[in-house]
Image: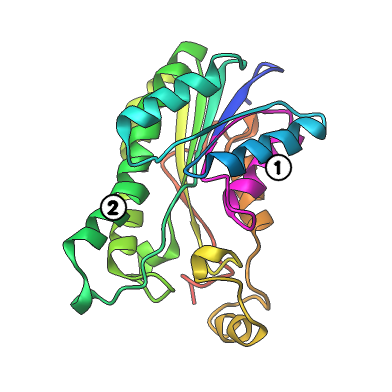
Amino acid sequence: MDTFPGERTAIVTGAGSPRGIGRAVAHRLARDGWAIGLLDIDGEAVGALAGEISAAGGRAVSAGVDVSDRAGVEAAVAEVTAGLPPVLALANIAGVSSPVPYLELEDGEWERVLRTNLFGVHYLTAAVAPLMVAAGTGRIVSISSVSAQRGGGTYSKTPYSVAKAGVIGLTRSLARELGPHAITANAIAPGPIDTDIMGGALSDERKAALVEELVVNRVGTVEDIAAAVAFLMSAESGYITGQTLNVDGGLYMH
């Protein structure tokens, strides 16, 4: 098993949404002893989250940033890491949905989704990976989607599926290239999760319809994904890399 220093930092993107995966991941990692660098396009929201984590006895610093802006990403990473312990982990969670049908798809929507959901993962990783190399080890976990594997069939459509498929390819390449530095890279492919990226809070009727496609009897929660991220960021996961972990209630298998 790999060993991590007692004081270590994880960068979490997309942590601003009150019902989102990023917020749940930040709280989970803070409970696991990580200092947290919080990034989100809503700087006020992640500032409040940093306050929550600090009030609960954790350590967190935040910055507002659009992950599709490379210069902004580099500045925000430098800002949040300046006063924190060595950066050993990155959770790429920031993302946008896109329910536009392909036959109605315009270039602006295509570019918006890919820039946030794929370019943003690259920009964050490029900014953080050198810090992991300097620390001597690291964990990169990026959120893909079962939509990438099934060609859609979820709330979001083509550009979302394409971007999330790109995340899987990027993850595998990062695993290969960064492995010699003791850095692992893995993706998580969520199935239906009760978050606002599904088009708002799920009604009981919509949950029931989604469950019909699953092999378990419930829709996923943000805590389900946070638990998977926490494991793939742990010292125990050092022999797992280049993988896509489906946390999807059996949807892809089904």
Q: Amino acid at mark 1?
A: Arg
Toward the top, the furthest residue is 134
Which residue bears the numbered disc 2?
Answer: 114
Tell me, yes or no, if residue 182 can be seen here: no
At horizontal 50% and vertical 71% (from top left) the residue drawn is 199
> Residue 63: x and y, percent?
53, 31
Asked which quadrant contains residue 26, the reply is top right
- The part of the chain drawn in magenta is 12-38
Q: Earlier in the sequence, mark 1 or mark 2?
A: 1
Q: Residue at x 36, y 62 (%)?
A: 148
The Cα–Cα distance between marks 1 and 2, rounded to whole angstroms, is 28 Å
Image vertical order of residue 119 relative to residue 128, above or below: below
Residue 82: image location, x then y, percent: 54, 14
**Residue for point 40% across, 23% down:** 75
In percent of width and height, residue 110 lies at: 23, 60
Location of mark 1 (residue) = 28
